[in-house]
């Protein structure tokens, strides 16, 4: 449900995981892009709601009769609000639950996890190896998942649960009285389980729902959603242009056909008789039944932030969704246009952004055609990433497109469906749904020859590339002259490959860098960071308190200690 806590997000296709970029979106001159272990910060339960604030702490509101709206302290990267309990995934991969413990739904098996989904009286979670664990009420088999290690998402409903496999197929288990555990065939990219029904988005963007349809909750209003959320008796979805559509039971005003017309949303989450949505500008709004305060979120809940380090300039996404840049502006790369953005990505001498309506905007040097004011104006996109002198983006149908310099074939992507793309100096890498990485373009140092593995993020740098594996390990390939492709051991939650160095974000919020360090770009300060972006010779990171800190070369005023409050866009997924 949003009793399933499935608000994950991948690139507006949507991570994390699958739907319009939402996470620590690490963009830089070589496109760290998005990474799949990114979650949307909002989840709506039966009669309460929860969200993760910019500092990583959880806040809940609404019904609290069993303490389900009273989260523990800590830094979390995902929250899931269920029926009468809630669970959070901490930055270190540990699950913590609170609320009703009648059926043992608060007691996860020991170990590390990458996603959690709280149902009505049971909970399910995804392990780094792709296997599932469920606990709590199991009278219908809803807490007995298949013994398989090929899952990328799980969603818990009332008396059933469903999972999305790496190959895009669905599997469900538990009660099937309404056909809710008989999913359709085909390849899907996002899944959401409600009380007695489910909905999912296919790889081609079409929508499928199955199970109980008493109120029309299993009859989608249309196709073409980038994120979908199934609740008790109604369903809502986010379209590529940021508009919302809802269908099903509407007696409390929880499912108007078109909530907030004209507004741009990055996520929607559906509960029992209320719904909440996160706008592109960071405002959180709720509608429907508010008898217990579940549709009255705290004010100023989100201070989302994003920073992107280019060659000699840096760009930031401000709390109101507008862009601000500083540093070298010779070609206008630090002079962004007006408007609301959900992503920014700084290249060598240009910058691109994804507007709230899914259209692209670029500015700066355009000598290779890399920065037309409005690339592909008739198309809607899920993600964009700027490299040296080229860019790549993912369309609404998950297909990649690139433009700009193509001397090494870096702007000639292969066919297929991708959940993330990362543009490097003269090469590009893309992450496919099943977790494999494909690269194209210059390969003189092996930077476009990725190893096999189940990855959740990829980052293309100067002449090397790095990927984040599902277990949190970093793997790099390509030029290793400065040991930029020799990552340290340990677990990380994001990786960003720069010119000839690499930085990664650890679960405890610390940043670790390796490789060239002539300007101090690989010597990060201490602090709790939410995102890191490695550029050519400087690096920037977003701190938990909303400030940005940079280190390394500052010869053009692009860098150190930019003390500004910024925000990070939200990938869509439910």
Image: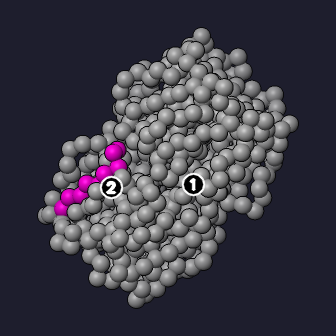
CA separation, marks 2 and 1?
Answer: 20 Å
> Dividing the picture into quarters, in which one does residue 449 lie?
bottom left
150 over 264 or under it: above or below: above
Is 372 left, or right, of 62 in this rendering? left
Q: Position of residue 208 (x, y in %)?
A: 67, 38
**Viewer-closest of 71 and 314:** 71
Q: Residue furthest top?
A: 139
Tally of marks: 2
Q: Residue furthest right?
A: 251
Is 453 left, or right, of 164 in this rendering? left
Residue found at x 32% / y 72%: 560
> Dividing the picture into quarters, in which one does residue 452 lie?
top left
Residue found at x 40% / y 89%: 330
Where does the N terminus fall, quadrant-wise? top right
Q: Position of residue 359 (x, y in %)?
A: 60, 68
42 over 262 or under it: above or below: above
Q: Residue furthest bottom?
A: 330
Whether residue 492 is in magenta: the answer is no
The colouring scheme, among rainbow, by chain, secondary structure or one colour, is one colour
Classify mark 1: helix, strand or loop: loop
Q: Position of residue 215 (x, y in %)?
A: 82, 32
Residue placed under numbered mark 2 in the picture = 527
Which callout, 2 or 1, points at the residue further toward the start of the chain?
A: 1
Where does the C terminus fall, quadrant-wise? top right
Magenta segment boundaries in residue numbering: 507-515
Residue placed under numbered mark 1 in the picture = 302
Whether residue 510 is in magenta: the answer is yes
Classify mark 2: helix, strand or loop: loop
Q: Neighbour class for label 1 at 10 Å: few (<14), some, many (≥20)? A: many
């Amino acid at each position: 449900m949003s009793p399933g806590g499935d608000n994950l997000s991948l690139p507006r296709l949507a991570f994390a995981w699958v739907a319009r970029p939402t996470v620590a979106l690490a963009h830089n001159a070589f496109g760290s892009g998005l990474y799949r272990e990114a979650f949307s910060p909002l989840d709506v339960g039966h009669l309460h709601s929860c969200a993760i604030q910019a500092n990583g702490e959880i806040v809940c509101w609404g019904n609290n009769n069993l303490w389900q709206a009273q989260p523990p302290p800590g830094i979390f990267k995902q929250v899931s609000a269920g029926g009468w309990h809630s669970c959070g995934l901490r930055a270190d991969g540990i699950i913590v639950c609170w609320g009703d413990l009648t059926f043992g739904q608060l007691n996860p098996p020991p170990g590390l996890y990458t996603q959690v989904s709280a149902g009505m009286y049971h909970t399910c979670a995804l392990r780094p190896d792709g296997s599932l664990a469920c606990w709590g009420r199991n009278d219908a088999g809803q807490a007995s998942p298949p013994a398989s290690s090929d899952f990328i998402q799980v969603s818990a409903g009332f008396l059933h649960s469903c999972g999305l496999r790496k190959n895009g197929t669905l599997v469900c288990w538990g009660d099937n009285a309404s056909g809710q555990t008989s999913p359709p065939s085909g390849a899907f990219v996002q899944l959401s389980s409600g009380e007695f029904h489910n909905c999912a988005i296919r790889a081609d963007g079409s929508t499928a729902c199955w199970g109980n349809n008493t109120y029309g909750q299993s009859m989608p209003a249309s196709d073409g959603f980038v994120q979908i959320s199934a609740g008790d008796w109604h369903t809502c979805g986010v379209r590529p242009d940021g508009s919302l559509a809802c269908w099903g039971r509407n007696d409390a005003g929880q499912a108007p056909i078109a909530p907030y017309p004209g507004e741009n949303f990055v996520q929607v989450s559906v509960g029992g008789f209320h719904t909440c949505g996160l706008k592109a500008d960071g405002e959180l709004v709720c509608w429907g039944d508010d008898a217990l305060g579940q549709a009255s979120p705290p004010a100023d809940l989100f201070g989302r932030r994003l920073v992107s380090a280019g060659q000699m300039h840096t760009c930031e996404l401000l709390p109101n969704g507008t862009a601000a840049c500083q540093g070298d502006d010779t070609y206008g790369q630090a002079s962004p246009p007006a408007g609301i953005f959900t992503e920014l990505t700084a290249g060598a001498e240009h910058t691109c952004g994804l507007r709230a309506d899914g259209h692209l905007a670029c500015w700066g040097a355009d000598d290779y055609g890399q920065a037309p004011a409005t690339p592909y104006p008739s198309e809607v996109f899920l993600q964009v990433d700027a490299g040296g002198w080229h860019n790549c983006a993912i369309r609404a149908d998950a297909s990649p497109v690139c433009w700009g310099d193509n001397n090494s074939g870096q702007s000639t992507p292969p066919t297929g469906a991708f959940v993330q793309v990362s543009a490097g100096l003269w090469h590009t890498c893309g992450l496919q749904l099943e977790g494999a990485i494909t690269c194209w373009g210059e390969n003189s140092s092996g930077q476009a020859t990725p190893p096999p593995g189940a990855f959740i993020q990829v980052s293309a740098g100067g002449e090397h590339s790095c990927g984040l594996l599902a277990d949190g390990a970093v793997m790099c390939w390509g030029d290793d002259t400065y040991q930029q492709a020799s990552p340290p051991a340990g677990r990380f939650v994001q990786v960003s490959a720069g010119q000839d160095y690499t930085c990664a974000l650890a679960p405890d919020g610390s940043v670790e860098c390796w490789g060239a360090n002539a300007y101090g770009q690989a010597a990060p300060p201490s602090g709790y960071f939410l995102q890191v972006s490695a550029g050519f010779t400087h690096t920037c990171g977003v701190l938990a308190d909303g400030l940005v800190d940079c280190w390394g070369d500052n010869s053009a005023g692009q860098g150190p200690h930019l003390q500004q409050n910024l925000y990070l866009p939200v990938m869509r997924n439910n």
